[in-house]
Amino acid sequence: MFVVSSPNKSEQEPAVLSELVSKAAKGDSVAFGQIYELYFEKVYRFIYYRTNHRQTAEDLVADTFVRVWNKISAIEDSASFNGWIYQIARNLLIDYYRSRKIDVDISTLENVLEYEDNIVDRANLSFQQKKFFAVLGELTSDEQLVIKLKFFDEFDNREIGEMLGKTEGAIRVIQHRAISELKELLNEDNEDEE
C-alpha cells in the first residue's frame, strides 16, 4: 500500500507565506489582507510590550503595515519576510521614541516586558517565576533581548538576527551565554536561600 504523507503545518507555512508575499508584491490586496491577518496580533504584541500603551501600539502597527504594503515589492526573498516586518516595527518604535524626544536608552526600551494584564499576571507568578524575572534583569541588554525574543515572542535565531542586524551564529552565542548565566544566577540564588 502506497501512503502519501501530507506536509505538516510548519512545512506548509513558509510556502503559503512565500506565495502570499509574491502576490502582495504584485499588488494583490487580498493576499496582503491575509498577511495582515497572519501578522497583526504578533506585531501588535511586539509593539505593545515595548510601549505599554494601547493607542500608540495600534498606531504603530498601522504604520508598520502601511510601510510593508509600500515596500513589499522590494522584498527579494520571502523567507526573510518575518524578520523584515519586525525590523520595520522596531524602526518605527525607535522613531516614535526619538520624535517624542523622550530620553530613553534604546536597549532599555527593547527590554521592557509589560503586558496588558501585567498586574494580575505579576500577582499570580509563582515564586520560581519571580526569581527568574529578577535574575533576567541582571543579564546584559543584548542577552535579555535575545531571551525575550526567543522564548516570549517565539522567534527563531535567524529572525532575531535579522531584527537585530546580527548573524544567526552571533544570536546563538548570545543565547547560549544568556542561558548559562541565567542557570548560574538561579543556582546562586538557590544556594543563598539554603
Image: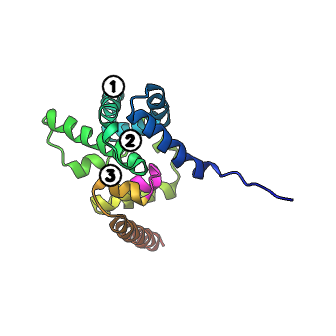
Label 2: state its secondary structure.
Answer: helix
- What is the crowding at mark 1: few (fewer than 14 residues within 10 Å), some, or many (at least 20)? few
Q: Mark 1, mark 3: which one is toward the viewer?
A: 3
Residue lying at 44% horizontally and 70% vertically, measured from the top left = 183
Residue lying at 75% horizontally and 54% vertically, measured from the top left = 4
Q: CA distance from mark 1 to mark 2?
A: 14 Å
Q: Are marks 2 and 3 in contact (CB under 8 Å)?
A: no
Q: Which mark is residue 163?
A: 3
Mark 1 residue type: Gln
Q: Which residue is mark 2?
A: 46
Q: The magenta stretch spans which residues?
A: 149-156
Q: CA distance from mark 1 to mark 3?
A: 24 Å
Q: Which mark is residue 55?
A: 1
Above or below residue 30? Residue 130 is below
- What is the crowding at mark 2: few (fewer than 14 residues within 10 Å), some, or many (at least 20)? many
- Whether residue 39 is visible here, answered yes or no, is no
Confirm whether the magenta stretch covers residue 83. no
Label 1: state its secondary structure.
Answer: helix
Q: Is residue 17 left or right of residue 48?
A: right
Q: Nearer the viewer, residue 22 or 45?
A: 22
Above or below residue 35? Residue 138 is below
In the rendered image, the residue lying farthest to the right is 1
Residue 159 lies, in percent from the top left, at 39, 54
Q: Quadrant of residue 89?
A: top left
First reached walking from the N terminus: tag 2 or tag 3 = 2
Mark 2 residue type: Phe
Residue 154 lies, in percent from the top left, at 47, 51
Mark 3 residue type: Met
Q: CA distance from mark 2 to mark 3?
A: 12 Å
